[in-house]
Each structure stands twice: as C-alpha cells, then as structure tokens.
Image (spheres, rainbow, N blue to C red):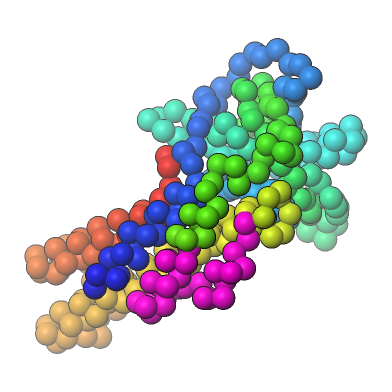
C-alpha cells in the first residue's frame, strides 16, 4: 500500500520534470510590427494537440481555408506553418504562446479518391518551435482565409529542453519510478532496461530528450486509460452485486438515481479518486 502511494506521488514529480506551465495569449487580432525575427506565419490551430521537434505528423486537409493555406505555402516555397494549442479559460479563447513548427514534406491530392471529401493527405516533420507575439488574422469554418500569427521561429540552439532540465535528477526520478512500477506490479510500466537507454541527448532528432517527452506523453495516456478501465471494473462488480441481491442480475442498465445511497456514495468516491489520480499522473498545467 505504501509503495502504491509512493508510485502515485512520484508520477507527477517525473511529469513536472518534463513539463512547465503553459503561457497563453488572447485569441484576438492585434497589430505588431514585423522585423527580421518576428514574421507573419500561417497558423493551423488543432485544439489540445501538441507536437514535438523531430516528430512526424500526417494531416488530412478538407476545409477550403486550409486547402488554400497549403496552396499558399507551396506557392511561396516556405512549406511551414505553426500549430498552437487553443483553450477556453473563464469564457475567453486563448492561444498558446509557443507552438510547434511543421514543415510540409509531402502532399498528395486525394480528392479523386475521396469524392473531394478530403483534398490533401500531407506528411510533415516538426522542425522547431515558434514564439507567438500575437494574432494577425482569425479564421472560422466556412471562411476562405486561414489564420495568421505574428511569430518568431526560435533558433535550433534554443529549442532544446535539456538546458531547463536537470538530466541527472531526471534519470534518477525515472529509475525510482520504474523500480516502483515493478515492485507494485503496475498494469502499465516501463521496462527496467529502459533506464539506461532513456533518451536524454541534446537536439531534436530521435534519441533526444524530445523523444522522452513523447514517450512520457504516451505513457500518461495509457496509464489514464487503464486506470479508468480498472475503476469501471470495480464499479461494475459493486453494481452487479447490488442487482444480484435484488434478483435483477440480468438487467441491461440501471439509473444512477435508483442505486441505494451507500452504493451512490461508493460510485462518487471512486469517480473522485480516479479523477485525482489521473490529474496527478498527467500533471497538466492549465
């Protein structure tokens, strides 16, 4: 039991070592003077989706405004655009201050195969990070123009995360996490061999710390999914036991309001626990 609690405590510690608070800007047009660093860059917001340097990305393009955006970046030869996060906080739409830069590597016109439901199938590489200074032009579904932002594409030497992370401490935290995962027979765990091969190299290629960031992101998703499944199984056993006592074990569904107060309390407590544990694991900074 104590080791299980330590595991839950260590998950957010390691997660915080790979993440930092996200800064946001108002999602509204502004005017900013461009210069040699700050330029106008096509912008393709994809909600909460995040890409990291070195990652390969495939997108299907169907909206008219983004079809035109791709035509534009092909015509001017830049082949680049940014993909910021967008959120709503306190009723206000916001855009992340930093955004991945995607470079278009290959574009296939698949309109004839999809009855024009999808125009382009595009392969990209995330080549860096841009710092957004403000939004030049907004875009909505049905519009002909795509979104544009004022942004500075950061130089390669400043996009590495290794300078902001204590690598020795990170590997130490990771080893403790892996050891506890195996001692507690966690349903989702890293292999012990992965401790020595943990990617901590500088830069943005495969084997860099960015690879570990992606690995950690996949782990969090799988951990949260498994935790939710385990909690559902616990609740299912409790509810089936209740129905069996009533002689209604073949009932296909049951309304929450029809459960006895004690079982309602159990359900709510379990739901609260899974929310807290998932939040601790994911450790997302809003």
Residue 251 falls in image quadrant: bottom left
Left/right of residue 44 with respect to residue 229 in the rendered view: right
Q: Position of residue 266 (x, y in %)?
A: 16, 67
Q: Nearer the viewer, residue 262 or 81?
A: 81
Q: Would residue 208 be counted in the magenta stretch? A: no
Residue interval drawn in magenta = 174-200
Q: Nearer the viewer, residue 221 or 111?
A: 221
Residue at (67, 40) in percent of width and height: 159
Residue 194 falls in image quadrant: bottom right
Q: Position of residue 256 (x, y in %)?
A: 20, 64
Is residue 35 at all visible to an observer of this figure? yes
Residue at (44, 28) in percent of width and height: 92
Q: Would residue 187 be counted in the magenta stretch? A: yes
| Above or below, 158 relative to 114 | above
How many marks on residues?
0
Left/right of residue 117 with respect to residue 258 in the rendered view: right
Left/right of residue 68 with respect to residue 136 in the rendered view: right
Residue 188 falls in image quadrant: bottom left
Residue at (51, 30) in percent of width and height: 24
Q: Position of residue 261 (x, y in %)?
A: 9, 65
Q: Position of residue 47 (x, y in %)?
A: 56, 43
Quarter in which the N terminus is drawn: bottom left
Is residue 66 at all visible to an observer of this figure? no
């Amino acid at each position: 039991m104590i080791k299980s609690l330590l595991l839950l405590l260590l998950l957010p510690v390691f997660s915080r070592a790979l993440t930092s608070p996200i800064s946001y800007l108002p999602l509204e047009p502004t005017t900013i003077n461009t210069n040699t660093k700050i330029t106008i860059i096509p912008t393709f917001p994809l909600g909460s989706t995040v890409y990291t340097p070195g990652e390969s990305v495939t997108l299907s393009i169907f909206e008219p405004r983004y079809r035109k955006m791709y035509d534009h970046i092909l015509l001017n030869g830049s082949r680049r655009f940014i993909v910021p996060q967008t959120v709503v906080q306190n009723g206000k739409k916001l855009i992340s201050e930093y955004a991945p830069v995607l470079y278009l590597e290959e574009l296939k016109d698949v309109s004839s195969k999809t009855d024009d439901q999808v125009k382009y199938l595009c392969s990209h590489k995330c080549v860096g990070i841009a710092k957004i200074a403000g939004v030049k032009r907004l875009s909505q579904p049905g519009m002909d123009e795509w979104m544009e932002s004022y942004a500075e594409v950061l130089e390669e030497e400043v996009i590495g995360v290794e300078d902001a992370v204590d690598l020795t401490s990170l590997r130490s935290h990771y080893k403790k996490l892996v050891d506890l995962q195996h001692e507690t027979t966690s349903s989702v765990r890293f292999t012990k061999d992965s401790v020595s091969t943990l990617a901590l190299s500088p830069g943005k290629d495969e084997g860099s710390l960015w690879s570990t960031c992606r690995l950690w992101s996949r782990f969090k998703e799988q951990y949260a999914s498994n935790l939710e499944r385990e909690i559902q199984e616990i609740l299912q056993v409790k509810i089936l036991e209740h129905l069996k006592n009533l002689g209604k074990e073949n009932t296909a569904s049951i309304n929450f309001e029809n459960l006895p107060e004690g079982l309602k309390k159990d359900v709510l407590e379990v739901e609260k626990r899974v929310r807290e544990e998932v939040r601790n694991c994911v450790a997302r900074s809003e």
